[in-house]
Image (tube, rainbow, N blue to C red):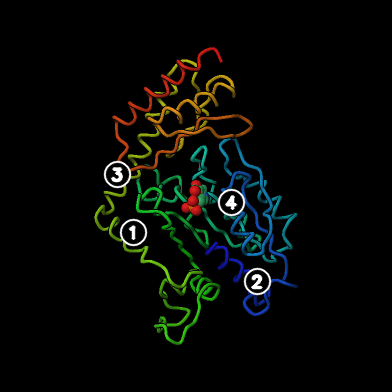
Amino acid sequence: MTCLAAARWRVLERAGWDVNGNGLTGAPRIPVFVGAERHDTVDMGLRLLGLGAPITVDVDSQGRILPDALEDALAHGSAGDGPAIVCLQAGNVHSGAFDPFSESIAVAREHGAWVHVDGAFGLWAAASPATRHLMAGAEQADSWGTDAHKNLNVPYDCGIVACRDVPALRTALGMHGDYLIHDPLGDHGPGDPFEKVHELSRRARGVPVWAALRSLGRTGVDHLVSGLVANARELARRIGALPGAEVLNDVVFSQVCLAFGSDARTQAVADWLVADGRAWMTGSPWRDHTVLRISVANWSTDARDVEASVAAVRAALAATEGL
Ligand SMILES: Cc1ncc(COP(=O)(O)O)c(C=O)c1O
């Protein structure tokens, strides 16, 4: 929402409209383009910003936005090079897939759109040489969001925003108080946290992030991220080899989606696992099927956890045989 607020301010400013002064009533419409499998928090952010529902763009079998479909949608849904926002995704919650950034951003640029990347967990792929290629081209975007409470494993509510357009971020979200110490460089300086988010009083979320990054270092973060991916791959390999099991996604990052013959059996396996409690994997609908969804997110997951998880799924399969 923070990035989209900056985007809203900037694309309207380019269209000659001051949203801070005039609000949205009478403003040029801002179409927002998203892949059909974006996370619902994007819609929530847009709703709170008064931008309404996004325009959904077709995706491929892994949930990646189709650049040609984006081109079509922009050609029909935006007013020439009028205000427009494109939200791309780094890390699909089911497949872990990454949107094709270079092609999609090139298309968005032709229409003068602001490009935001939702990389809640996937942005961390860039921190590991083993997965960095998944993020290729994403650096050309205007803004990026990620969560330190996901892959970095710091406590919850630790969202991180990166925004190329600092004046837009500061103007959209900064607030003034005579009693506060403001960035002496004004809107062009880096700004204090309260000058860049919609909260004023907030705890020092940056401290655990700094501590985690400082203690892990680049190599430690790389090992953390690549460890999650290695465990996901091993889970996919081992569970996929069980009789009746099928891995549905290309396991490029930390997500694995599995099916066991029929939707009914897959749901029964998921229910059995949740009741059993040894491994946390849940059922989810994906591409018109019920899947068992695995998201490896915890730094402490190791080979024993993988072993225990495979054993739990094996037991779930035995308990649901014949369904
Ligand atoms: C791709 C994606 N975007 C956004 C979110 C929302 O993040 P949060 O729950 O931290 O608000 C999540 C996960 O919850 C996610 O996986």
The quadrant of the image that shows the C terminus is top right
Q: Amino acid at mark 3?
A: His
219 and 307: which is toward the camera: 307
The residues tagged by marks 4 and 3 sit, at their Cα atoms, a distance apart of 30 Å
Find residue 127 and report its horizontal and vertical position in percent.
36, 50
The residues tagged by marks 4 and 2 sit, at their Cα atoms, a distance apart of 22 Å
Find residue 46 and report its horizontal and vertical position in percent.
62, 59
Write the residue at 67% across / 49% down. 56
1 or 2: tag closer to the N-terminus: 2
Q: Picture quarter containing residue 266?
A: top right
The quadrant of the image that shows the N terminus is bottom right
The residues tagged by marks 3 and 1 sit, at their Cα atoms, a distance apart of 17 Å
Q: Is 271 positioned to the left or the right of 296 in the image?
A: right
**Residue at the spot of label 2:** 12
**Residue at the spot of label 4:** 104
4 or 3: tag closer to the N-terminus: 4
Q: Amino acid at mark 1?
A: Val
The answer, for residue 90, to whether it is visible in the render is: no
Front disc: 4 or 3: 3
Please tell me whether mark 1 sits on a helix, a strand or a loop. Answer: helix
Find residue 246 and report its horizontal and vertical position in percent.
50, 23
Q: Is 23 positioned to the left or the right of 279 in the image?
A: right
Front disc: 1 or 4: 1
Write the residue at 50% across / 30% down. 292
219 and 210: which is toward the camera: 210
**Residue at the spot of label 1:** 209
- Look at the numbered disc 1 and say if its residue's Cβ is closer than 8 Å to ligand 1: no
Density class for disc 4 (Cα within 10 Å; few <14, some 14-19, many ≥20) is many
**Residue at the spot of label 3:** 223
172 and 90: which is toward the camera: 172
The residues tagged by marks 2 and 3 sit, at their Cα atoms, a distance apart of 42 Å
